[in-house]
Image: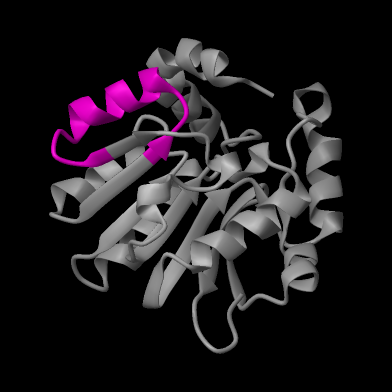
Amino acid sequence: MLDNKGFDLWADGYDKSVQLSDESNTYPFAGYKQVLNTIYHRIRENGKKKILDIGLGTGTLTTELYKDGIAVTGIDFSPKMIQIAQEKMPNARFYEFDFTKGLPDELLTEKFDYVICTYAIHHIDRQHKINLLSLLKGVLNANGEILIGDVIFQSQADMDSCIASSGDEWDDEEVYIVVDELMNDCDMDVQFIKCSYCSGVCIIRRGAEAI
């Protein structure tokens, strides 16, 4: 896995490398634009909201929401990534912080309509995902949602098929969400929208049946 210095080195070419993988329909970014479109339209259809983006990278998704007047708070552990995002969104709030350690203290008392995480949560292991989602529940408004867009599979069989087709490109250091396992581990109210053979969006709602 990359550390923060690795991400700094990758930051300048990040958007282009993602685009190439998406357009060639190859792992790991096949369906990337559809993932972002799904999250973008879900937030936009409910009007202007307050969002928290964890592991925001260069702010590809949140920049479009920011342009629509949505209040953006972003977290990333790479100062170079934050610098690029801040150039796109000068009035947004940014925190240089490693979300694998939770959230900055000043955000723990805030409430957000959406917490989004795109192509970042695969850097933490299964138990830390459960712990993080439990923490994020606490910063959601009553009708809020956690939206996770990433390399995600409905079942282990779906992931095994992707592994077989990806060959040497498969990164076995990453820990991807398998929706069936997530629901068993956490008893969460999860909806999964498949965007490609290796990607999708998990919608986790706060409510009586959520998390």
Q: Position of residue 77 (x, y in %)?
A: 47, 29
Image quadrant containing the C terminus: bottom right
Expressed as whole percent of the image width and height from the top left, the position of residue 46 reads 26, 73
Seen in the picture, residue 37 relative to 59 is either above or below; the reply is below
Q: Position of 47 compared to 177: left or right? A: left
Question: Which residue occupies the extreme bottom position in the image?
Answer: 208
Please tell me whether residue 202 is drawn above or below residue 36 in the rendered image: below
Task: Examine the image and state in which quarter residue 174 appears.
Answer: top right
Above-or-below relation of 81 to 37: above
Which residue does the image show at 63% across and 21% down from the upper left?
2
- Which residue shows up at 69% across the image and 24% down it? 1
Give yes or no for residue 91 being in the magenta stretch: yes
Residue 68: percent from left, percent from top: 15, 53
**Magenta stretch containing residue 138, yes or no?**
no
Q: Is residue 66 left or right of residue 111?
A: left
Q: How is the image coloured?
A: one colour
Q: Which residues are magenta?
A: 75-93
In this orientation, does residue 9 appear?
A: yes
- In the depicted view, which residue is nearer to us: 135 or 35? 135
Mark yes or no: residue 194 visible. Answer: no
Q: Is residue 97 left or right of residue 88?
A: right
Q: Residue at x 63, y 45 (%)?
A: 151
- How many tags in the picture? 0
**Point 69% across, 59% down: residue:** 130
Q: Position of residue 112 (x, y in %)?
A: 33, 64
Among the 4 quarters of the image, the one containing residue 40: bottom left
